[in-house]
Amino acid sequence: MQLTIAVYKKNPIIILSVVSAVIVLLLCVTTVLAASPQTLENKGTAKTINVIDGDTITLDDGREIRLVGIQAPKIPLGRDGFKAWPLAEAAKKEMEKLSIGKSVTIYTGETPIDRHGRTLGHVMVNDNTNAWLQGEMLRRGLARVYTFNDNRALANEMLEIEKTARQNNIGIWAKPFYKIISDIEAADYVGTFQLIEGKVLSAQRVGTRVYLNFGPIWRTDFTILIEKDGLKMFAKSNIDPLSFQGKYVRVRGWIKNKNGPMIEASHPEQIENIN
């Protein structure tokens, strides 16, 4: 402690950086603990014994935990011909530093298990750091926010942490592979998960669907599709998708080729108003 204080006195910038980091950490911890009684369920505590990649860990009770709400850079994991994404190994190593050998508590949301049998959880480390692993990976620029319509807890908090890392070009955000693309570029990225920014030229309701069109030719230009179930979620969040007309937005999701490049927005957190 004496050495730390001496260093702080010599360099006020370090003081500010350390204080800022502590504040961010406390906010992350408070966020998860505050959310857990209302939206998340405590699924017990165990020790991390293995890290599969930057968003998946194995516990000593046999559970495999997929950190819900984020997507770390992917590694091959035995898939033939799959090329590791930039910083995939760095993300895995950082997760090892954060979690290996440590006791963690798992909190699950609406859908606790995925089709692979993995637990979909928010993970808190039970040591003097009290790290929220999702927040830490986002803060380090080693993951993107990646939510689903049945697992939206803490989405807005994660988006804010991601925003800070992105604005400071931390980690993946300094790599062209993860750049935010424009709606005009979307056709070149079909089959991939992307963040896309552009202006919604028109918003139209057709039957039980809403289409947000980014160009005058809907058969070829980029479009966001919101189906009936998605519209219900937007309504519950008091968001009218038609209000996006004329607005600049950022949307995230997998790009499909359906009358031109398209992303289906199944829940509100996929679309951010960036006006």
Image (cartoon, helix red, strand yellow):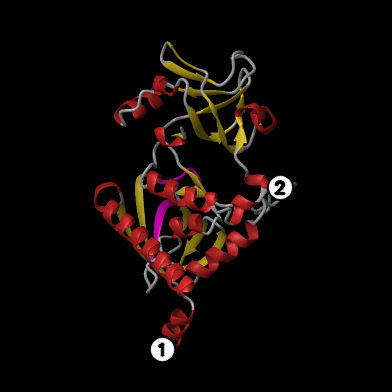
Q: Is residue 123 magenta?
A: yes
Disc 2 marks a residue whose amino acid type is Phe
Q: Which residues are magenta?
A: 112-125
Measuring from the top left, give residue 201's x and y in whole percent.
52, 18
Residue picked out by circle 1: 2
Left or right: where 77 falls relative to 63: right
The residue nearer to you, when weighing 7 against 90, is 7
* Vertical comparison of 62 with 164: above or below: below
Q: Which comes sooner in the sequence, label 1 or label 2?
A: 1
Amino acid residing under circle 1 = Gln
- Pick the quarter of the image with the N terminus: bottom left
- Is any atom of residue 74 visible in this view? no
Q: Is residue 209 above or below residue 153?
A: above
Residue depth check, mark 1 versus mark 2: number of the one nearer the observer: 1
Q: Residues within 10 Å of mark 1 (few under 14, many from 20)?
A: few
Question: Which dot marks residue 68?
Answer: none
**Residue at image coords 63%, 20%:** 260
Percent across and percent down for residue 256 are 60, 28
Secondary structure mostly seen in the magenta stretch: strand
Question: At which x and y percent is residue 29?
Answer: 34, 61
Q: Secondary structure at mark 1?
A: helix
Q: Secondary structure at mark 2?
A: loop
Q: Among all residues in the image, which is located at the extreme top?
A: 207
Q: Residue at x 54, y 67 (%)?
A: 96
The answer to whether residue 159 is magenta is no
Q: Residue at image x 34%, y 25%?
A: 232
Do we see residue 75 in this rendering?
A: yes
In this view, the residue in front, 254 or 117, is 254
Q: Which residue is mark 2?
A: 82
Q: Identify the residue at image location x=69%, y=49%.
A: 79
